[in-house]
Every structure is written in C-alpha cells, then in structure tokens.
Amino acid sequence: MTETIKVEGLEELTAGFAGLEKSLKQYLRAALVSIGNDVKSVMVRSITSQPKSGKVYKRRSVSHRASAAGEAPANDTGRLAGSIGVFPDLEKLETEIGIKRPMVEYAAYLEFGTSRMDERPFVAPAGKQTREKNYQKIKKAVALGIKNAK
C-alpha cells in the first residue's frame, strides 16, 4: 500500500514569480530615481541655501562667506552644486548620487577634509538626512510591486 503526493501547478506558480519580479523591478526603479533626486536636492540645498559661519573673503569687489568646519561648503561659483548628478543603473537596481564627470577636483577635499582643512561634508549628511524617507519609498515600492504583480 502506498500514498502518492503530487505537486501540480508549478509552472503557473513560477510564471507568477516572473510577474512578481517584473513588477517589483518596475516599482523599485521608479523609487530609486525618486530617491536619487531627493538626495541630490538635499545636497544642493545644503550648499546653496544653508547659512554659513566661516571667514569672509574679498575678491576684487565681491565678498564671500566661507563655510566653517563641519558645515556644508559655501556656494561661491555654483560649480560644485551644479556638478551634482543622479546616476541610476536600473538593471542593477542601484543609483549613485554624486559629482558628475569630469569631477570637480575639490569635491573630495571638501567632503573629507585635508591635512590643512577640516571637512565640509555635503554628501554623507544628505544620505543620513534622507535615509528614513528613502527606506519608506523602498518599502512602498515593494508593497506596490507585490500588489500589482500579474
């Protein structure tokens, strides 16, 4: 005497997972682009909008207030803020937010400091400031991807 256990419907189940993967990728890609733009906006605003408390320098007839140690860099020419870009790799499901190529050569010196200058971070604080919101966007994208899978 035997009992037979048979699995049926495996093809339909795995086909459903293919639909799930496609749906998840669609929503996650959109979330990554949105997250990249949010982080970029925070980076740019930290440079262009936040008040600075460093030394005041005068070049010709123009005064410029630099940032103090620990503050985001002060906007001077706009070159640093204008060089920040979002670089999504949607196949890998990742996005980078940073300095466009060719790199503004002094960006790393500002972010990390040098032996002669303390750091003026603007990249890491933007990531930290947006971390919870980014997590919520990913969480929502996953929920929508599951809900709308075909």
Image (cartoon, rainbow, N blue to C red):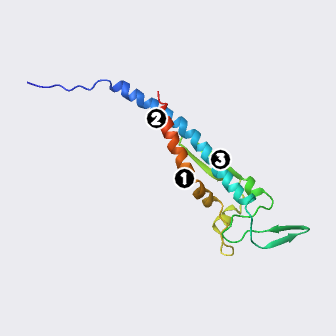
Q: First in sequence, mark 3 or 2: give its number.
A: 3
Query: Helix or strand or loop: what does disc 2 sit on?
Result: helix
Picture residue at 8% right of the left edge, 24% below the top: 1
Left or right of 73 in this view: 16:
left
Left or right of 134 in this view: 62:
right
Residue, disc 1: 132
Residue 56 vertical placement versus 145 (above, below): below
Q: Badge 3 local density, few (<14 within 10 Å), some, or many (20+)?
A: some
Residue, disc 2: 146
Q: Farthest left residue?
A: 1
Give residue 99's quadrant in the image.
bottom right
Query: Residue 111 appears at what percent x and percent y?
Result: 65, 64
Kind of residue at disc 2:
Ile
Kind of residue at disc 1:
Glu
Left or right of 63 in this view: 111:
left
Residue 37 got which mark? 3
Picture residue at 26% right of the left edge, 26% below the top: 7
Q: Farthest bottom residue?
A: 116
Residue 109 vertical placement versus 40 (above, below): below
Query: Residue 125 appears at what percent x and percent y?
Result: 61, 60
Query: Helix or strand or loop: what does disc 3 sit on?
Result: helix
Q: Badge 2 local density, few (<14 within 10 Å), some, or many (20+)?
A: some
